[in-house]
Amino acid sequence: MALALRGLAGTPFRAEAGTALRKLIAAMHGDDAAAAHELAGRIHLFGGTRSGGPPSGGSGGALSAGRVLRIRYGDRFGAATLREIEPLGYVVGAEHWYLMAWCRLRGAVRAFRTDRISSVAVTAEVPAPRVLRREDLDIPADAVSQLTDWLAG
């Protein structure tokens, strides 16, 4: 909901969107509001962020699962690989959503375009805590913000 309301930031309805979001958060139970704020801190907005729907490819619950995921991922050439990943956050751009995750195959943080994820299986394994840092995004700092930056404003 916060991301959809954030899509109104460049319109005459910005103030009303902010008010609606504050009312929504105020109506939430404390634990739910804290979980929503933590999730918002893991969503990064890049450039001309769209206000469209949730990530495609079945990865929408990746962050809330809190587990290692086994995904089938197709690269830009169509070659598919099976990966075990530890979800860290999302980057939302003008055209696509990207699931940012620690990729066990590559041993590094990788961006997975969500529309290229053809299957997702949640494993029983709970990964060690990792934090997605801005420098992991490989995007100029002035071109990216967190959803929580907008929530605060």
Image: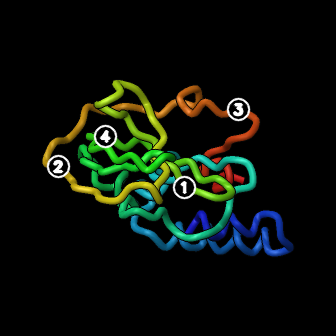
Real-space Cα separation, disc 4 to disc 1, in angstroms: 16 Å
CB contact under 8 Å: marks 4 and 2:
no
Closer to the N terminus: mark 1 or mark 3?
1
The answer to whether 127 is drawn above or below residue 108 in the figure is below
Real-space Cα separation, disc 3 to disc 2, in angstroms: 33 Å
Closer to the N terminus: mark 3 or mark 4?
4
Residue 12 seen in the figure = yes
Q: Mark 1 points at which residue?
A: 97
CB contact under 8 Å: marks 1 and 3:
no
Q: Nearer the viewer, mark 1 or mark 3?
A: 1
Mark 2 residue element: loop
Q: Mark 2 points at which residue?
A: 123
What's the residue at 61%, 30% (across, down)?
Answer: 138
Closer to the N terminus: mark 2 or mark 1?
1
Q: Which of 8 and 102 is in front in this view?
A: 102
Q: What residue type is labelled 1?
A: Trp
Q: How far from the left and from the top, in percent, is residue 13?
A: 80, 75
Q: Nearer the viewer, mark 3 or mark 4?
A: 4
